[in-house]
């Protein structure tokens, strides 16, 4: 499967340079008639929660957290049939949710048409679009927010398969969907480049030449909507090549949505991360939903600092209309460290989220 996917990624990579030239020529040929349309959007969420440490030193803790994001999106269809658009995301939290400061997050521009979609800027790698574990409530499974409420030291539940590249500058191309099948590939020249910097192929810090590919299929079978995805990512880390694989499944049948995912990342000669997770959402009616989720992450270090993390979460959500919802989560986090500093934490959080 890997050889087949690698071949598809390499073929798709060859299309990137051609697609860039063709898109640029088409844009030059199209005379601008007016400014692109700009749209403002985002969300604000406010949570109140309590957490307890189940070990010898009990911790009872109430806290208030918030998170907010504002984004500006623009799109314009040109006279030649191409569509040009983009998105600028701004983190607007005050730091209480783990964000260090306000600032811009992902920023990108794209050109789309019958050839597919070409996107450039600060974006996730292709494999990160595979999908993860879906639940309702403030505490999820993927990159779990449990650590906002209980003394959990970092989340091992990660399925984006970006090998640590995050939102570094990259070029991302996706083919048109053909019978539900779509291929995507991204190339990150400098994986440590989260913002604009001089291109330097002799990068000595961080890592470079990140290539990520994704095969995704969506279709309907027997009344169910099914989505399958398989991703693969590699990056040059100097003396060691990082590589990772992730896969996901999503099934929607009436009021039930089931999601499952797995990921493996080989990050160094001494460290390997693995994750598996699943979630179930049940819509009680048009406004109320409940969910259950499970995730288990494992980090293996040859240096003797192995760690395992298991997260369970149960959530409920009520949609109040016009982008406003209230929700709550009850969760448990179990972390086992080779050093013996094990924790078993339980908590609850609830609040409101407004999308605009």
Image (spheres, rainbow, N blue to C red):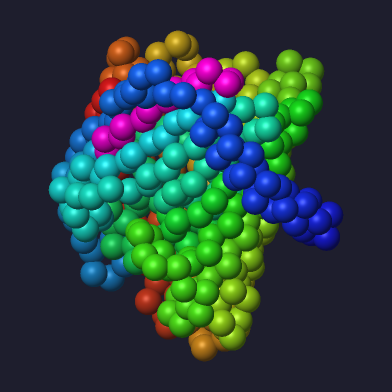
Whether 92 is drawn above or below 113: the answer is below
Instruction: Tell me which residue sits at (26%, 45%) in the image.
Output: 91
Magenta stretch, residue numbers = 69-81
Majority secondary structure of magenta residues: strand
Estimate the x, y position of residue 2 in percent, counting from the top left.
79, 59
Whether 305 is drawn above or below 286: the answer is below
Q: Quadrant of the C terminus?
A: top left
What number of labels is visible? 0
Estimate the x, y position of residue 105 in percent, counting from the top left.
33, 48
Q: Is residue 231 visible?
A: no
Instruction: Tell me which residue sits at (35%, 59%) in the image.
Output: 195
Instruction: Tell me which residue sits at (56%, 82%) in the image.
Output: 238
Question: Hey, which quadrant is residue 233 in on the image?
Answer: bottom right
Q: Is residue 340 left or right of 177 when viewed as pictured?
A: left
Q: Is residue 176 visible?
A: yes
Q: Is residue 8 left or right of 291 when viewed as pictured?
A: right
Does the magenta segment cover residue 273? no
Question: Hey, which quadrant is residue 166 in on the image?
Answer: bottom left
Q: Which residue occupies the foreground of this view, 10 or 61?
A: 10
């Amino acid at each position: 499967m890997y050889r087949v996917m690698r071949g598809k990624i390499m073929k798709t990579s060859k299309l990137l340079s051609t697609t860039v030239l063709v898109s640029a020529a088409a844009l030059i040929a199209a005379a601008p008639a007016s400014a692109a349309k700009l749209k403002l959007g985002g969300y604000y969420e406010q949570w109140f929660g309590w957490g307890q440490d189940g070990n010898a030193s009990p911790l009872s803790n109430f806290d208030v957290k918030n998170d907010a994001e504002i984004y500006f999106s623009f799109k314009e269809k040109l006279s030649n049939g191409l569509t040009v658009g983009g998105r600028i995301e701004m983190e607007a939290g005050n730091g209480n949710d783990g964000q260090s400061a306000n600032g811009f997050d992902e920023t990108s521009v794209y050109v789309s048409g019958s050839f597919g979609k070409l996107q450039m800027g600060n974006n996730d790698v292709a494999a990160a679009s595979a999908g993860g574990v879906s639940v309702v409530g403030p505490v999820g499974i993927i990159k779990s927010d449990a650590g906002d409420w209980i003394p959990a030291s970092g989340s091992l539940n990660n399925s984006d398969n970006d090998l640590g590249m995050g939102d570094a500058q990259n070029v991302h191309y996706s083919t048109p969907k053909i019978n539900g099948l779509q291929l995507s590939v991204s190339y990150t020249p400098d994986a440590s480049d989260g913002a604009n910097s001089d291109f330097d192929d002799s990068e000595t810090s961080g890592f470079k030449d990140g290539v990520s590919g994704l095969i995704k299929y969506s279709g309907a079978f027997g009344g169910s909507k099914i989505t399958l995805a398989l991703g693969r990512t590699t990056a040059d880390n100097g003396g060691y090549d990082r590589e990772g694989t992730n896969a996901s499944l999503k099934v929607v049948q009436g009021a039930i949505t089931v999601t499952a995912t797995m990921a493996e990342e080989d990050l160094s000669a001494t460290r390997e991360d693995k994750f598996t997770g699943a979630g179930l959402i049940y819509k009680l009616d048009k406004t109320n939903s409940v969910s259950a989720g499970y995730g288990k992450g494992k980090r293996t270090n040859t240096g003797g600092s192995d760690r395992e993390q298991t997260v369970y979460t149960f959530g409920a959500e009520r949609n109040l209309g016009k982008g406003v919802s209230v929700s709550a989560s009850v969760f448990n986090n179990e972390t086992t460290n080779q050093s013996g500093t094990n924790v078993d934490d339980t908590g609850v959080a609830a609040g409101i989220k407004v999308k605009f």
